[in-house]
Image (cartoon, helix red, strand yellow):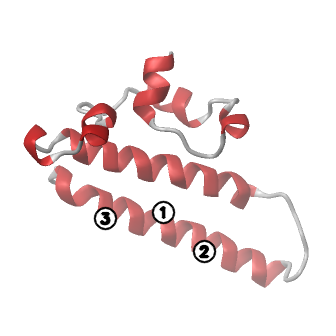
Amino acid sequence: TMPRNTQHKYVLAYLVAYLSAQHIYSMYTDFGGYNMDVRTYTMLLMTKLWGLTFAYKDGGEKIENLTKDQIERRVVQLPGVIQYFSYVFFCCGCIMGPFFEYSDFQNWI
């Protein structure tokens, strides 16, 4: 497996490339038009996945190297499948805004 301190870079690169490909495809097939399509949800999903990777990276760091906020929001162990999907597909996420920390969601549940 890859060390925790480098995983977030690869996740960010993948997310940006995937979202960019969706935008380019949409511009190629329907330039100037407006369609509510997968790009809308992909942008919301991207913020959650990126935040989760940084919180997981912080979970592998020494406590002395973290700020108070990072200590409160760090994720030591990756969530299981049900916890992950409940975080990603939480229906009230659109009401609260596109992004909220995984640790906040877990504490609320």
> Left or right of 85: which side holds 43?
right
> Which element is circle 2 on?
helix
- Location of residue 41 in the rendering, given as x and y in whole percent from the top left corner: 68, 51
Give amino acid for label 3.
Lys
Q: Which residue is mark 3?
A: 9
94 lies above or below 2: above
- Location of residue 2 in the rendering, given as x and y in whole percent from the top left corner: 17, 54
Give amino acid for label 2.
Ala
88 lies above or below 16: above
**Sequence order check: which comes first, mark 3 or mark 2?**
3
91 lies above or below 48: above
The answer to which of 50 and 73 lies nearer the viewer is 73
Q: Which circle, 2 or 1, is nearer the viewer?
A: 1
> Left or right of 48: which side holds 41?
right
- Location of residue 93 in the rendering, given as x and y in whole percent from the top left corner: 65, 35
What is the CA distance from the residue labelled 3 to the residue labelled 2? Answer: 18 Å
Q: Which circle, 3 or 2, is nearer the viewer?
A: 3
Q: Which residue is mark 1?
A: 15
What residue appears at the point 25 percent right and 30 percent down from the top-left corner? 77
What is the CA distance from the residue labelled 3 to the residue labelled 1? Answer: 10 Å
> Which element is circle 1 on?
helix
What residue appears at the point 46 percent right and 48 percent down from the top-left corner? 49
**Sequence order check: which comes first, mark 3 or mark 1?**
3
Q: Do the CB atoms of the residues marked 3 and 2 lie less than 8 Å apart?
A: no
The answer to which of 1 and 53 lies nearer the viewer is 53
What is the CA distance from the residue labelled 2 to the residue labelled 1? Answer: 10 Å
What residue appears at the point 89 percent right and 69 percent down from the top-left corner? 34
User: How many C-alpha atoms fall within 10 Å of the one at disc 3: few (<14), some, or many (≥20)?
Assistant: some
Q: Which residue is mark 2?
A: 21
Give amino acid for label 1.
Leu
